[in-house]
Amino acid sequence: MAIHLDPLPSPRRKTQFRLAAVILGLVLGALASVGLLKLRATVFPSTQWLYLYEEGHEKTGHRFIHDERLGWRNIPNWTGTTFGEPLSINSQGLRDREYSITKPAGKRRILVLGDSYAWGYGVRNSEMFSEVLEDRLLPGDSWQVINAAVSGWGTDQQYLFLQDAGFNYEPNVVVVSFFFGNDFREISSSHQYALDKPVFMDRDLTLANVPVPRPRKEGSNPLIETNVHSFDLGVTILQRMAADCDKRKCQLVVLKFGTYLDPATREKTKNMIDTLAEISDDFAAALRAVPNLAYLDLDEHFAARNLTYEKIGIVPSRDFHWNAYGHKTVASILAEFLSSQGIIETKRQPVVSP
């Protein structure tokens, strides 16, 4: 079934989008001592799994396995580290505690989808915003927050997981963490981070490059690029998510971030920030018109708090990923938003402190 959207940005605005995205990537790259996720393949002896190691995994500790549907995924029942902080993957391949697939009687659930930010890049499991939200902000023990994020995943992979497995958890709310810095790029082709992945070819979400081929020892598999602008495709995927959630009587929440730069950096990149702000406004306008989609702009809240990377980012590397305090802040903002939308009732005691 074709998806029809309200008018999207003009060709001139799309050109600005491409330029701003490139500049933003350069700015964020300069801020990070450890680059964006890059994976390499190696066969693990005596199993059918193909392990994928992140470039620099000796420092980060991250590794994944090849998946013919999603490209890569977490390793079930694995314990490791992320920059020296402990991480654990449960039996269902989620970076979270164990949950039953079937929702227990009397429980309500939030399912979190996202990339390395929601996955908890650089922080221990207990510090991820999903865990802070469940353990310290939601009322009583009536809510469960299930973290299904995977480092490096684009919105397309997240949507496929939601279709294949996510809805089996019977969520009342689905939260999609959308990073403006690279999520548009990640859905644009079948190659990301030196690995193959699925790709939607059009706004009907025709799927290509599935089954996802295994990495080659030499060279790379053919590149497949989507036929539509990634802005249009990103909005389409989120609209389809909202419609699918509505059929299952659950609420979709889009948690957008990635255009905020702290005061020191913002002064040096004013023109780029102004362009990004216009594109962000277009994105917000497109999504706020989608039924059953609640849009939360984290960047507005970060700006209102005048936060710096030293405050919310991994220090001393100045990595743009959130540190433990950053995750606390995100959890608090998200809880307040869900409460303001009438989705949840929150505990009164705040958790955010330096």
Image (cartoon, rainbow, N blue to C red):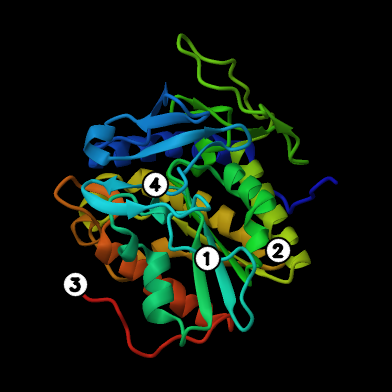
- Label placed on residue 354: 3
Check disc 4 and report the residue beneath it. 78
Question: Could you tell which of marks 3 and 4 lies nearer the N-terminus?
Answer: 4
Q: Amino acid at mark 2?
A: Cys
Name the residue furthest top: 218
What is the x, y in percent for residue 16? Answer: 50, 38
Check disc 1 and report the residue beneath it. 99
Q: Nearer the viewer, mark 3 or mark 4?
A: 4
Q: CA distance from mark 1 to mark 4?
A: 16 Å
Q: Examine the rendered structure and indicate whether residue 272 appears above or below residue 96.
A: above
Q: Amino acid at mark 4?
A: Trp
Q: Is residue 301 visible?
A: no
Question: Could you tell which of marks 3 and 1 lies nearer the N-terminus?
Answer: 1
Q: Is residue 263 visible?
A: yes
Say which of 12 and 343 sits in front. Answer: 343
- Label placed on residue 84: none
Name the residue furthest front: 46
Check disc 2 and report the residue beneath it. 245
Q: Amino acid at mark 1?
A: Tyr
Q: Residues within 10 Å of mark 1 (few under 14, many from 20)?
A: some
Q: CA distance from mark 2 to mark 4?
A: 30 Å
Image position of 145 (left or right of 302): right
